């Protein structure tokens, strides 16, 4: 599939569908069995509201490098199972995961589907829970009969979309594999005929149907697949140069990762500026030290002028209570590490951390997990900061070998426009105030 080349809070643009877009037969398209014509409104992902393009994605998805090739030859079942159980264990309870992973592996072999892609979809769609039922769908891959109008061409009998059948993990995965193969065959011609938000692969259609409205789900699924391949291959810690001549590794697995907001961007309507780079990530993902160093702080950001409070890992549970989270500042739980040559890294919004002040860490050591502590509106992400001799530096440049720059995203363009609007409002207010003062003096 890759040869054709790709519950979080998603910030969205206002590029809405036509007025009838929320009906089950109006937002997507399908190729007819007859002459390959595209008929609007037959295959789509159901939505409870108007569909809008996501902004946490590259304006031009060709900026992503090519995805890793599928594993050639026999799959090592033990290594595959361990990798999927490890990743799914970040977002789901361990009970039942070995059976789920076994089914993923066997169905992938039966349908000749990339097992890492099927596992990544299960991770993204249902958090590896075969019993999950939501407004989006049913079972491991969150498939739903209402995705397909009565006239839609499908690669299986329509009875295969029954609720009880889809709750069977093996059946759910077989249906999903058939859908992936269908869109892999048809997505190029469909995109040419009806247009879609720019995306990379047929996988994007799995989330939207024939017309793709956002590349974000595809990006996150492909990131999960890269992570699985790294775990399966037991990849060693890789180092690359940084802007400060300090060899570093990625703070998150599955690089490259997407930077969604950069240094200096407005926060809280311009009341403060963003001090780092936000990297798109899923709650529970491991966060790793980018270089050897010593932990100089591990604790919680506090509101107002209160200094950050140092904590031990065992004290975090108490801070999850509502009366305590209300005292938490925008940084949430965070860790700072001092490296060589006066370089200090910071990791914010953590769900948890496992290190203590004074502890020595090696590059690639897990120091915590991704969360959204301290975050008011956006989804989970890692906020990363970098200082050199006490001065704040641009972390996007420091991590340029490992993340795609935020200034290439739709988020950045919107943030720039909002900043210009704020500056214009301030200038108008000043001019009005000056005019009022002058009129008062006349």
Image (spheres, rainbow, N blue to C red):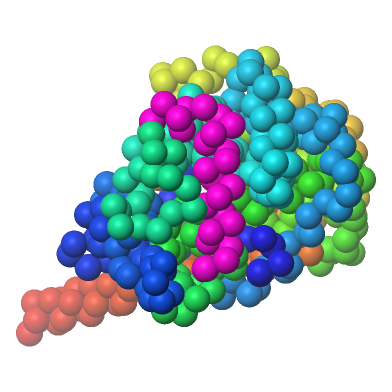
Q: How many marks?
A: 0
The part of the chain drawn in magenta is 163-187
| Residue at 51% over, 21% down | 320
Residue 267: quadrant of the picture: bottom left
Query: Which of the two residues, 226 or 399, is positioned nearer the viewer here?
Result: 226
Whether residue 35 sits left or right of residue 216 in the image: it is left
- Residue 238 at x, y = what percent? 89, 52
Q: Vertical placement of 422 versus 172: above or below? A: below
- Residue 270 at x, y = what percent? 40, 60
| Image quarter in which the C terminus is found | bottom left
Residue 55: quadrant of the picture: bottom left
Whether residue 369 sits left or right of residue 412 in the image: it is right
Regarding residue 222, the answer to whether it shows in the image is yes
| Residue at 88% over, 43% down | 74
Q: Vertical placement of 324 versus 363: above or below? A: above
- Residue 301 at x, y = what percent? 56, 35
Query: Which of the two residues, 311 or 176, is positioned nearer the viewer here?
Result: 176
Whether residue 210 sits left or right of residue 141 in the image: it is left
Magenta stretch: dominant SS?
helix
| Image quarter in which the N terminus is found | bottom right
Q: Which residue lies furthest to the front in this view?
A: 34
Regarding residue 335, the answer to whether it shows in the image is no
| Residue at 67% over, 56% down | 257
Q: In the rendered structure, does residue 59 fall within the stretch colored magenta? A: no
Query: Which of the two residues, 301 or 404, is positioned nearer the viewer here?
Result: 404
């Amino acid at each position: 599939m890759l040869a054709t080349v790709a519950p979080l809070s998603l910030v969205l643009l206002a590029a809405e569908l036509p007025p009838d877009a929320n009906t089950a037969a109006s937002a997507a398209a399908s190729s007819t069995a007859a002459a390959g014509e595209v008929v609007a409104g037959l295959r789509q992902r159901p939505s409870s509201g108007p569909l809008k393009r996501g902004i946490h994605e590259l304006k031009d998805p060709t900026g992503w490098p090519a995805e890793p090739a599928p594993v050639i030859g026999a799959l090592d079942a033990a290594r595959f199972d361990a990798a999927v159980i490890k990743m799914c264990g970040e977002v789901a309870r361990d009970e039942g995961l070995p059976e789920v992973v076994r089914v993923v592996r066997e169905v992938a072999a039966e349908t000749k589907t990339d097992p890492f892609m099927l596992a990544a979809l299960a991770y993204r769609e249902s958090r590896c829970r075969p019993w999950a039922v939501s407004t989006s769908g049913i079972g491991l891959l969150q498939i739903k009969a209402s995705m397909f109008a009565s006239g839609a061409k499908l690669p299986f009998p329509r009875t295969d979309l029954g609720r009880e059948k889809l709750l069977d993990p093996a059946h759910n995965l077989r249906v999903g594999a058939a859908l992936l193969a269908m869109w892999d065959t048809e997505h190029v011609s469909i995109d040419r005929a009806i247009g879609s938000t720019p995306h990379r692969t047929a996988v994007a259609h799995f989330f939207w149907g024939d017309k793709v409205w956002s590349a974000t789900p595809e990006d996150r699924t492909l990131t999960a697949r890269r992570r699985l391949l790294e775990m399966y291959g037991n990849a060693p810690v890789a180092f690359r140069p940084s802007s400060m001549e300090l060899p570093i590794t990625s703070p998150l697995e599955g690089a490259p990762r997407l930077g969604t907001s950069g240094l200096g961007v407005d926060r809280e309507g311009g009341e403060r500026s963003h001090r780092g780079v936000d990297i798109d990530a899923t709650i529970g993902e491991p966060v790793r030290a980018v270089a050897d160093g010593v932990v100089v702080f591990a604790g919680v950001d506090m509101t107002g002028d209160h200094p950050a409070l140092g904590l031990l890992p065992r004290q975090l549970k108490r801070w999850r209570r509502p009366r305590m989270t209300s005292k938490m500042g925008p940084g949430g739980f965070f860790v700072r590490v001092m490296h060589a040559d006066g370089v200090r890294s910071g990791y914010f919004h953590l769900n948890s951390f496992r290190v203590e002040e004074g502890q020595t860490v090696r590059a690639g050591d897990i120091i915590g997990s991704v969360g959204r502590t301290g975050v008011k509106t956006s989804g989970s992400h890692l906020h990363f900061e970098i200082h050199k001799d006490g001065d704040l530096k641009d972390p996007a440049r420091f991590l340029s070998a490992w993340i795609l720059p935020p200034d290439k995203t739709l988020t950045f363009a919107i943030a720039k426009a909002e900043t210009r609007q704020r500056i214009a409002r301030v200038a108008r207010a000043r001019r009005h105030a000056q005019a009022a003062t002058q009129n008062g003096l006349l």
